Amino acid sequence: MSLMDKALEARAKAYAPYSEFKVGSAIRSSSGKIYVGCNVENASYPEGTCAEAGAIAAMVAAGDREIAEVAVVAGGAEPVSPCGGCRQRLAEFAKGDVPVHMGTLDGAAITRTMAELLPGAFEARHMDS
Ligand code: THU
């Protein structure tokens, strides 16, 4: 099963009764394991969590720290684009050359690298004195 198919599977479990915009994400770590997440909303709208955040949390909780590949899928007409916050979350564990596949339900997809999605990312080194 492809990484995008894993993301699609996760999307089916999304809890998005407020936006009705279901998102699924799958991350392959450098160890080869795959972690998935879906968006989980709640009545206090800003407190909901994105699909990518869920997949990252699953990866870190399992002891992995390095992202090798990412897939995100949602139901829009255009391939879903990770939000700004999730770009920063992904960049914490993904080097600039990591591919991020963004898909639609009808199978269209585009791929961009992390560096393309978040050029000039704020990194830990910026806090060095
Ligand atoms: N969403 C994600 O899960 N990932 C993104 O990168 C974009 C937005 C979710 C958050 C919210 O539950 C819904 O999509 C609408 O914004």
Image: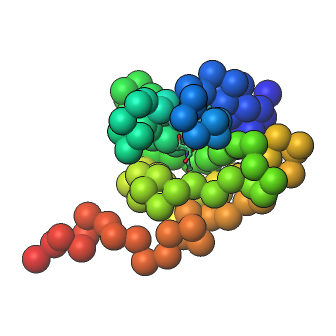
- Residue 37: x and y, percent? 55, 31
Residue 57 visible somewhere in the drawing: no
> Along the line of sight, which residue is nearer the eye, 63 or 76?
76
Q: Residue furthest top?
A: 13
- Residue 44: x and y, percent? 36, 36
Quadrant assignment for ligand 1: top right
Q: Residue furthest left?
A: 129
25 versus 6 height, above or below: below
> Along the line of sight, which residue is nearer the eye, 44 or 52?
44
**Residue at the spot 36% in from the left edge and 27% down from the top edge:** 61
**Residue at the spot 56% in from the left edge and 63% down from the top edge:** 114
Residue 65 lies left or right of residue 55; in this view the side is left
**Residue at the spot 59% in from the left edge and 72% down from the top edge:** 116
Protein image colouring:
rainbow
Residue 92 lies left or right of residue 1; in this view the side is left
> Image quarter for residue 78?
bottom right
57 versus 77 height, above or below: above
> Along the line of sight, which residue is nearer the eye, 38 or 34?
38
Residue 79 visible somewhere in the drawing: yes
Residue 9 lies left or right of residue 118; in this view the side is right
**Residue at the spot 49% in from the left edge and 75% down from the top edge:** 119
The mark total stands at 0
- Residue 111: x and y, percent? 73, 60
> Image quarter for residue 85?
bottom left
Quarter that holds the C terminus = bottom left
Residue 53 lies left or right of residue 98; in this view the side is left
Quarter that holds the N terminus = top right
- Residue 42: x and y, percent? 42, 30
